[in-house]
Amino acid sequence: MDKLPHRKNIRLKYYDYSQEGYYFITICTQEKQKLFGEIINRKLILNDRGKMIKKWIYQLENKFPHILIDKYIIMPNHLHFIIIVVYPNDNIQKHRLTVTGGHTGPPLPHIIQWFKTMTTNDYIKGVKNKIYPSFKKRIWQRNYYDRIIRNEKEYQKIYEYIETNPLKWEEDKYYV
């Protein structure tokens, strides 16, 4: 019997993704399906599905009180956001990038898994109620991309990238 191919782990080896810090996250739809809206005249117009995704982004902070969603953008076939992981009594300032502490909570992969599960379940419910069109196999790609933001300069660059993403949609590597 042939062995199944081993999927490559794209997380940083030996890094504790439950520790405090700033993380840039990108989650893409399966096969780059444009599910969440469109860019018209360089402006993002979310459809009902995009608004549903937005609702669940806001729910992340309620479900995981040790995180803050600092900046996000929902694009037609992907989304970007900056998650700040911080624990109580650590006196974080919003843009202080040298966060340290001994507290741990659910690691980042667990948070992203919860988000993907909730949005998928909500989407399926919409399909069953004939509110949303069906999708191919799954909504999300199996993995996601993360980048640990290590300093203020990197943070500013990523923040600006998120801010201007709709303006550069046709140049975006996720554009189809």
Image (spheres, helix red, strand yellow):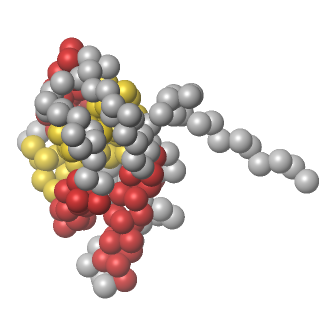
Residue lying at the far right in this picture: please name it: 1
- Residue 33: name its quadrant: bottom left
The spot of residue 174 in percent (x, y) is 35, 38
Furthest-bottom residue in this view? 129
Q: Quadrant of residue 134?
A: bottom left
Vertical position of residue 99 compared to residue 105: above or below: above
**Quadrant the C terminus occupies:** top left
Give the left or right position of residue 13, taking residue 112 as reference.
right
The answer to whether residue 25 of the structure is visible from this angle is: yes
Residue drawn 56% across the image and 28% down it: 14
At x 24%, y 23%, the residue is 97
Q: Nearer the viewer, residue 170 or 24?
A: 24
In the image, 24 versus 14, the foreground residue is 14
Nearest the viewer among 90 and 136 is 90
Q: Would residue 145 be visible to someone looking at this image? A: no
Note whether 17 is above or below 2 in the view shown.
Answer: above
> Is the residue 82 above or below the residue 140 in the image?
above
